Image (spheres, coloured by chain):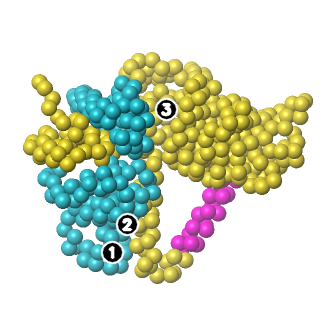
Chain colours: A cyan, B yellow
Amino acid sequence: MKDFNKFREAWFRGVYQKYFPELYFYLRTFTVNETDIQDIIQDSFLKLLENDRLESVANVRAYLYSCVRNALFNKIGDDRKKERLKIEIERERSGPDTEPLLSKEQLLTLTEEAIDKLPPVCKAIFKMSKIDGLSYKGIAERLNLSIKTVEAQMGIAFRKIREYVAVATFELIHDR
Amino acid sequence: MTDNTPYEALGAYLAGEASKEQTDMLLRWRDSSEENMRLFNEMTAAWGCCYADYATFAKSREKVLKKVISLSRRRRVIRPLIQAAAIIGAVAAGFLAATLISRIGEEKENSQIIAAPVGEITVSTMRGQKSETLLPDGTRIWLNSGTTISYPSGYGTDGREIKLKEGEVYLEVTHSDTAPFRLITNNGFIKVYGTSFDVRDYPEDANMTVTLKEGSIEHFSNSGVALAKLRPGQELTYHKSSGNMLLSECDAENQSVWRFGEMKIEKASFMNMVLVMERWYGVDIKLTGHIPSRSLYWMTIKTELLREMLTLINKITPIDYDIDGKTVNIRVK
């Protein structure tokens, strides 16, 4: 590793500010454990810096993502999520990323507004899945519903969130 | 127009519940058009960021950055540089301590101490004022604007008990194995084991919040039923009328910077921001016009005067305002 000099540090800070948010929210789609998220991101950036020939890391973003995914794979014990991650590792290239229309903060506000407006049962199911990390089976048992119903309600939740966000995005864009 | 988006498969995929067929179908759908790809990415992002708390995010961002930089530096930086940094640090700390002491000196005059006949001591601050009190056992209490607390005159000798009647306090409780400390609020009491924490319970707020910076505390109902135990960096929100509680991660330092003469507003709606300003400046704010419901505000108030803050807000959200003694009229344009 080269000296961690001023220039290298400045370069690193730029890279960090640029990629931290997306890595953070990407990780949050798999886990809500803040310590795990911090550890994984920290190790990934350290790996990037320890790379002897930094210049040869052509695509920093792809490099970071691959570090994050590998670390995540070792960390999560949940087979269902591992399966999902495997697919994403396999499809590394996954086509060009489309530019998002909203900032993460706007999306966060809108999503939470949308969740708030969901019918009660639908909302409860969504929260149990997202916040408590319960499996469909676990939710079904708790609420005395069938797994099919849980699945259907999750579908409804996503459809409603999508519709709400789409309408609000349209309004936000045309407000300006 | 019919929406043929496979929402059920999408939900199952993100929740980690999708079957092989569902996943294959979903990914085929995703890759079949740019619009589908966008929707997929947006929903994945929404799943990732919902219930994310901005303060937690910002805290993690800074913490990891510091750690990575210090780990990278430690491996190669030469000693003298570290020593130089230590000296600068010590000088800066000395300066900070000096300003703090002088400020605490000023603020003492803001509070009124009334000795009631029953042997109860009451300390209160007016709206727009803050103060700090030191108790016989070395416990420190900061009182935010519009706050009243009381404690028995025998405090420290026969038990340690403080009542928060209304408002917000930050406490640094001296550790003692023999004398447990209790903070009694209108919504149950908090048992303390030597710690720093913040409690906010204004009558006009729907919630009481308890934020723990370090140590360990436990919240009990009035009748003594244990309700929740907090770890450092957690916040307990207690909905007063229903008794519902929510335990969440938070930036405990931010919650209590008011004691250093700063006020941080994070991810607040327009209404919440106005409520905070009312307390901070000790004024009544009357709102008219179309109040923005979807915007969120971040700001830090240090030494800014009320008029400066209003000018600042006007730059973000256009408003008309006039100040009439203790009343401020704001009309959102």
Residue B288: image quadrant is top left
Q: Amino acid at mark 3?
A: Met
SS state under label 3: helix
Q: Which mark is residue A43?
A: 2
- The spot of residue A64 in percent (x, y) is 28, 63
Whole-Å distance between the Cαs marked 3 and 2?
38 Å
SS state under label 1: helix
Q: Amino acid at mark 1?
A: Glu
Whole-Å distance between the Cαs marked 1 and 3?
44 Å
N-term mark: 1 or 2: 2
Residue B155: image quadrant is top right
Q: Is residue B261 visible?
A: no
- Write the start and end of the magenta stretch as one range: B84-101
The quarter in which the N terminus of chain B is drawn is top left
Of residue B175 and residue B317, the one placed in the foreground of this image is: B175
Q: Residue at x 71, y 51 (%)?
A: B193
Nearest-to-viewer mark from 1 and 3: 1
Chain letter of the residue carrying label 3? B
- The spot of residue B162 in percent (x, y) is 76, 39
Q: Residue at x 52, y 19 (%)?
A: B286
Q: Is residue B86 magenta?
A: yes
Q: Which residue is mark 3?
A: B273
User: Could you classify mark 1 by the number of other residues whose Cα lies within 10 Å: few (under 14), some (14-19), or many (20 or more)?
Assistant: some
Q: Which residue is mark 1?
A: A50
